[in-house]
Image (cartoon, helix red, strand yellow):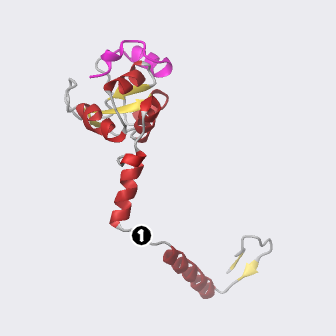
């Protein structure tokens, strides 16, 4: 076989095909030996810490709420679970005012990403996602998000420049 078999070589080289295959196999086997899986317990500890579910990884205040929401972007969960279970488990001294401040300021939106999930009217079990306003358009690739009967012009205005209507019209 003819080619360049080294990263810093500029001239063409020749190598017998079987020898090149043997070198490749030895390289791949060596790389596989270097990578070892972690135990399920270690993986679970990592996931709990990464999701902020351990005491030493919990966050505080509005910036912490924003960080948690960014980490959970695109995750559709029951509307009632956000303030009852999801956010209090990840944020020290969580109060609903923290989330309300971010949504009423227009920095974050509560949207139903998959209109087929849940009923036509929002209830506590309706799956919603809480997204940063600037990235909301990225999550609409599979179709328009349901917005409780608001006009498309109003929705476009809200996504581009902040809330143009009371926050209660998009929150439950």
- Left or right position of 74 against 18: left
Closer to us: 167 or 113: 167
Q: Which residues are magenta?
A: 150-172
Q: Picture coordinates of residue 102 (x, y %)? A: 42, 24
Q: Say if the magenta span includes residue 159.
A: yes
Q: Secondary structure at mark 1?
A: loop
Identify the residue shown where x is 42% and y is 46%.
57
Identify the residue shown where x is 34% and y is 28%.
111
Q: Say if the magenta span includes residue 52.
A: no
Identify the residue shown where x is 31% and y is 30%.
112
Q: Picture coordinates of residue 69 (x, y %)? A: 40, 36
Q: Quadrant of residue 44?
A: bottom left
Identify the residue shown where x is 46% and y is 24%.
107
**With respect to residue 63, does 166 lie above or below?**
above
- Left or right position of 72 against 8: left
Residue under label 1: 37
Would residue 141 be seen by someone viewing this image from the given angle?
A: no
Mark 1 crowd level (few <14, some 14–19, many ≥20, 10 Å Cα): few
């Amino acid at each position: 076989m003819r080619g360049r078999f080294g990263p810093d070589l500029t001239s063409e080289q020749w190598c017998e095909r079987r020898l090149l295959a043997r070198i490749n196999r030895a390289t791949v086997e060596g790389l596989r030996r270097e990578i070892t899986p972690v135990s399920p317990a270690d993986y679970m500890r990592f996931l709990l810490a990464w999701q902020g579910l351990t005491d030493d990884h919990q966050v505080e205040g509005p910036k912490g709420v924003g960080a948690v929401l960014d980490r959970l972007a695109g995750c559709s969960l029951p509307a009632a679970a956000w303030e009852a279970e999801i956010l209090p488990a990840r944020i020290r001294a969580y109060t609903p005012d923290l989330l309300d401040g971010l949504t009423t300021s227009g920095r974050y939106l509560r949207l139903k990403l998959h209109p087929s999930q849940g009923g036509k009217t929002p209830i506590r079990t309706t799956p919603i996602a809480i997204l940063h306003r600037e990235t909301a358009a990225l999550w609409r690739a599979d179709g328009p998000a349901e917005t409780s009967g608001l006009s498309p012009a109003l929705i476009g205005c809200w996504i581009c420049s902040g809330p143009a209507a009371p926050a209660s019209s998009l929150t439950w």
